[in-house]
Structures are given as C-alpha cells and as structure tokens.
Image (cartoon, rainbow, N blue to C red):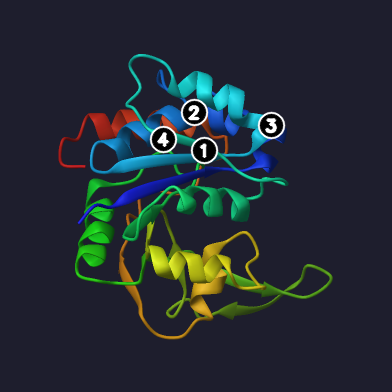
C-alpha cells in the first residue's frame, strides 16, 4: 500500500515567508519536512501560486529529495492546496502535514502510518494537556480552573484515507483546518499518542528554541 504525504504551502504564508524559508541549523522548515517525509513515503508539495517560484527553487536543489510540486487554484488557501495535492494522488492513504511543524518524532510518524495500513479513515496524534487551564471573564479576571483531564492537543502529521480527505474538502463548513471538520463527522477517527516534547513552531521568533530542540534530538539517538 502506497502512502503519500501532502504538504500544503498556502497563500497566507506569503506574509510570513520566514515560516517556510528561514534556515535553522542549516535547513529551512520546507527542506526539513520534505527530507523527513520523503524518507518513508512519496511527497506532494501543494503551493499557492504567489509562493510557487520560491518553493520550486528550494525543492530543485540537488541535495533535496525529489518530490512532486503542484500549484493550487486561487485564492490558494489551505483548502485549495489540499485539493490540488489530492488531485495528484491515486486512491490510498494520505499523510497531511503542516509547515508549522518542522520536526516530528519517528514514533508518531510510525503510529500514524500503522493506523493507516490497518485501514483507518482518519488518524490524529494527540497529547494530554498538562498545563493549568484558567477561564477568564471579559475583564480578564480568572473565574475558574478548567478540568484538563478530558483536554488534548492535536499534532501533525495526520492521516486520512483519500476518500475521507476528499469528503472533508467537499463540506461547506471546512474552515481551512481539517481537524474541526473530521471531528464533526462522527465515529471512525483513530487517536494515537503524540510526542509531548514537540509543538508548533513560529519562525523566526522560535528559531532559538527550535535550534536547541534539534540539538537535543541529535544528541539522543533514541528520539
């Protein structure tokens, strides 16, 4: 069973190109994600037209693994990028990634892939919320401590059957995040353990944190 990874690069990132192209520890987020995904599956990068030349230049470098590049229809939101990438695929499982997650654990990736191989229609890696969560009123005054026991964060990459992803994109309430749409679709979503040491990164402000995290991971062969 062939699994294809789909990486959308939507038009809103043109306002913050550092998220895609800023080098940290010698590689941009785009390069790092493509290298990690290409090691285990085929990769399609679906990009908004206004960013296509810059993305193509990165992907054409001789040391970057070969991937397929497709340009999304206007206005090039995440929705159009996902649809453009999906049009490049045959029926089969799809890994959906996000440029804001330049690193992810091998264990999480294997968990998502394993669930897809077992026939899951949707797979989400999750982590329990460990921070104290407070409710505040309109004045910003704390009014209560929220029970965090049922709360979870959701990470990337996420897995879908091609049919499920097409169904999500075809719904009128798709809001540029497949998560909310899939959660309203009923049962059938498989949840796996994510990695509590990894979170979404915003560059360039998180560059120092990402560099430290990469250094820590490189020094620990088990990660």
Dot 2: element: helix
Distance, label 3 to label 2, CA atoms, is 29 Å
* Mark 4 and mark 1 residues within 8 Å of each other at the beta carbon: yes
Q: Nearer the viewer, mark 4 or mark 3?
A: 4
Q: Nearer the viewer, mark 3 or mark 2?
A: 3
Relative to 82, does residue 72 appear above or below in the rendering?
Answer: above
Using the image as rendered, state which of residue 10 and residue 127 is in the foreground. 10
Q: Which quarter of the rendering shows the C terminus? A: top left
* Mark 1 and mark 3 residues within 8 Å of each other at the beta carbon: no
Q: Which mark is residue 145?
A: none
Dot 3: element: helix
Dot 4: element: strand
Q: Earlier in the sequence, mark 1 or mark 2?
A: 1
Q: Which mark is residue 50?
A: 3
Q: Which mark is residue 68?
A: 4
Distance, label 4 to label 1, CA atoms, is 7 Å
Q: Which mark is residue 70?
A: 1
Name of the residue lying farthest toward the left:
222
The residue sitting at 56% across, 65% down in the picture is 169
* Mark 4 and mark 2 residues within 8 Å of each other at the beta carbon: no
Name of the residue lying farthest toward the right:
139
Relative to 202, does residue 196 appear above or below in the rendering?
Answer: below
Distance, label 1 to label 2, CA atoms, is 32 Å
Distance, label 1 to label 3, CA atoms, is 13 Å
Question: How many neighbours does mark 1 have within 10 angstroms: few (below 14), some (14-19), or many (20 or more)?
Answer: many
What is the x, y in percent for residue 197? 35, 49
Question: How many neighbours does mark 2 have within 10 angstroms: few (below 14), some (14-19), or many (20 or more)?
Answer: few
Answer left or right for 158 relative to 8. left
Q: Which mark is residue 208?
A: 2
What is the x, y in percent for residue 184? 54, 81
């Amino acid at each position: 069973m062939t699994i294809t990874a789909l990486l959308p690069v939507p038009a809103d990132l043109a306002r913050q190109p550092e998220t895609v192209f800023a080098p940290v520890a010698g590689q941009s987020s785009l390069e790092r994600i493509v290298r990690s995904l290409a090691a285990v599956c085929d990769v399609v990068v679906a990009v908004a037209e206004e960013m296509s030349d810059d993305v193509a230049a990165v992907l054409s470098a001789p040391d970057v693994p070969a991937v397929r590049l497709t340009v999304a229809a206007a206005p090039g939101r995440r929705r159009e990028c996902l649809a453009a990438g999906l049009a490049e695929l045959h029926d089969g499982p799809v890994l959906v990634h996000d440029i804001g997650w330049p690193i992810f654990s091998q264990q999480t990736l294997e968990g998502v892939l394993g669930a897809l191989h077992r026939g899951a229609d949707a797979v989400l890696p999750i982590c329990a919320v460990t921070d104290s969560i407070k409710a505040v009123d309109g004045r910003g005054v704390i009014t209560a401590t929220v029970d965090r026991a049922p709360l979870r964060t959701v990470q990337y990459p996420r897995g879908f059957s091609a049919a499920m992803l097409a169904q999500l994109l075809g719904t009128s309430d798709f809001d540029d995040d497949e998560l909310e749409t899939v959660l309203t679709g009923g049962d059938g979503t498989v949840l796996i353990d994510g990695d509590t040491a990894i979170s979404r990164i915003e560059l360039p402000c998180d560059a120092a944190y990402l560099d430290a995290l990469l250094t820590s991971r490189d020094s620990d062969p088990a990660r």
